[in-house]
Image (cartoon, rainbow, N blue to C red):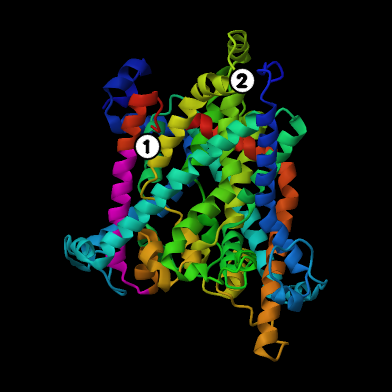
Amino acid sequence: MKIGTIKRPNETQKKLRWGYRAAYDIKKHYPIYLMILPALVYFIIFHYFPMYGAQIAFRKYTIGDGIWTSEWVGLKNFTTFFKSYYFERLIRNTVLLNVYDILFGFPAPIIFALLIYELRNKVFKKTVQTITYIPHFISLIVICGMIIDFTSPQGMINKIIGFFGIGPIQFLAYPEYFRPIYVASNIWQETGWNSIIYLAALTNISPELYEAAKIDGAGRLRQAVSITLPGIAPTIIIMLILRMGRMMDVGYEKILLLYNPSIYETADVISTFVYRKGLLEANFSYSTAVEFFNSLINFVILVAVNKISRKVSETSLW
Amino acid sequence: MNTRVRASGGRLFDISNTIFLSLIILITLYPIYYVLVASISDPVSMMKHTGMLFWPKGFSLESYKHVFAYPMIPVGYTNTLFYVFVGTAVNVLLTTLAAYGLSRKNLMFSGYIMMIITFTMFFRGGLIPTYLLVERMGMVDNRWILIIWKAVQPWNLIIMRTGFAAIPDSLIESARIDGASHFKVLWKIAVPVSKAIIAVMILFYGVYHWNAWFYSMVFLRTRVLYPLQLVMREILVANDTRYMTESFVSMDDKQTIAATIKYATIIISTVPILCAYPFLQKYFIKGVMIGAIKG
């Protein structure tokens, strides 16, 4: 390594070993690396250390044990989970909540955006938008506090249906009401906000298309079907693909706030189960295994969805 | 939009569309209105009332008195302000520095570092390993853990990096030739031209800290450190109003006032956000757009 004899850095650099090039690069750009360093250190500590620590899923870890010194048990924690009564229930609940949420929650903002788009009165249009965005800004704790109160025997919903002689029903005590409550409250909170992206896509449709259609004698409905919908179809497809990528992800914070043992049958999902088993019952290895399994499935779905997305729309996450 | 030509006719559709959307407005606002009206109602008549609620039932600020007298509310508010301001400051500082650094070309490792960062969006160590790490660091029940454990969100970093990368090279290079350091270029050129993105970042991170409760619950033990959301969780979700209803003797009285106390709590904690919202709306919408372009 005759570093001292470098005369034409560009040519000689290539011949230097990787390590030397790296050292040279870091030395040359050290202020920039210094800017990146804090964030990099953060990611290594708070993301990669836990990933490394996730190996306790394959061990029998107890408090006082080190990660390395605890006994290696292989896939035992995983097989225990697969064979347990909970496995099927947790998967079913996680998938079903997502399916219902997509089935009802996904079309809502699209329809809503189309209706807003058809409004002629500008002031009313702005009012509808501003007001329907509001619920998005209410914190989850308050939303759940409201849901719990409204569905209680003395709550708003029972006061209204009681007027017609029904009830009172303690909605959050029966498993069959949980999914509707979860999905409906999501729709109430997010439809307005989620319509923003579609409204933006709508404003990008060229006005000339409508003019031409009008000359051809197309009516309002015909215009909506032949111009408006195709115009936002790419956005719809991308949003749907992105949503499908979160199939095994569920709003567990909301569930954690709403559920109780009497409705675990429909409300308990993987993340809430991990929280109970892991942090409340200190079953560290077992719950880490359950969570690891969930992350793995999530990862596989994301990769698959990304592949599909690249084929269908030439857009992808990475 | 102005030039869009509408087909003639369809009056019936316009009318029913307007009616339908007015109904949506009512459905959106009614639950919020209900909470507001119920919070200023007289607790006893509120309890007895059935059917739709349109106007306050009687008038009483009794429940607000109890909420304001409850010391955990100001404690929670103060803590939340600390988490929001200090947390967001740390977030935005670290994200800006790293995003600018990673937006520079001809950096040998920027590709690798981006890979390291992006991967964390798709695979996580998980709740338990994170908790065990924090415990080992001795940071459980320390208010700073809520600041540092989410110091940078990878998605925000990517958005910001894209923004910085769009700044013309000539702008930065000419400043560099004039002898400005990288930090000076960032501060004097890159930050001023990226004001909009930084505003969006402040909002994203700020809202995150305002709403955060789950990991606050996981990491904190002492109630004095609780953010407002956790204090509200005790009142609204765990249904724990005993501190505020101590002055009532009978169980019935306690229950009666407890209901309206909850409404008053919701109003007190939500009003600041709803007041700020109209002014910030356009930045939030801009944020949705910036995120969507990248996605």
- Chain designation of label 1: B
Q: How crowded is mark 1: few (under 14 residues within 10 Å), some or many (20 or more)?
A: few
Q: In this view, does B20 lie above or below A51?
A: above
User: Is residue B244 in sight in this rendering?
Assistant: no
Badges 2 and 1, same chain: yes
Q: Which residue is drawn at 23% across and 66% down?
A: A84
Amino acid carrying mark 2 in the image? Leu
Look at mark 1 in the image and give the residue it sits on: B115
Q: Is residue A136 above or below residue A18?
A: below
Task: Select label 2 or label 1 by which is in front.
Answer: 1
Residue A122: give x, y in percent of width and height.
Answer: 75, 30
In the image, taking residue A103 as reference, residue B62 lies left or right, namely right
Give whichever of discs 2 and 1 has the lower sequence position. Answer: 1
User: Is residue A283 in sight in this rendering?
Assistant: yes
Look at mark 2 in the image and give the residue it sits on: B171
| Magenta residue check for A297 | yes
Magenta stretch in the rendered image: A281-303
What secondary structure predominates along the stretch shown in magenta?
helix
The residues tagged by marks 2 and 1 sit, at their Cα atoms, a distance apart of 28 Å
Residue B228: give x, y in percent of width and height.
Answer: 63, 65
| Magenta residue check for A50 | no
The N terminus of chain A: image quadrant: top left
Q: Identify the residue at the far bottom of this view.
A: B249
Residue A197: give x, y in percent of width and height.
Answer: 56, 33
Q: What element carries label 2?
A: helix
Question: Which of these two is toward me, A294 or A187?
Answer: A187
- Chain designation of label 2: B
Question: Which of these two is toward me, A188 or B23?
Answer: B23
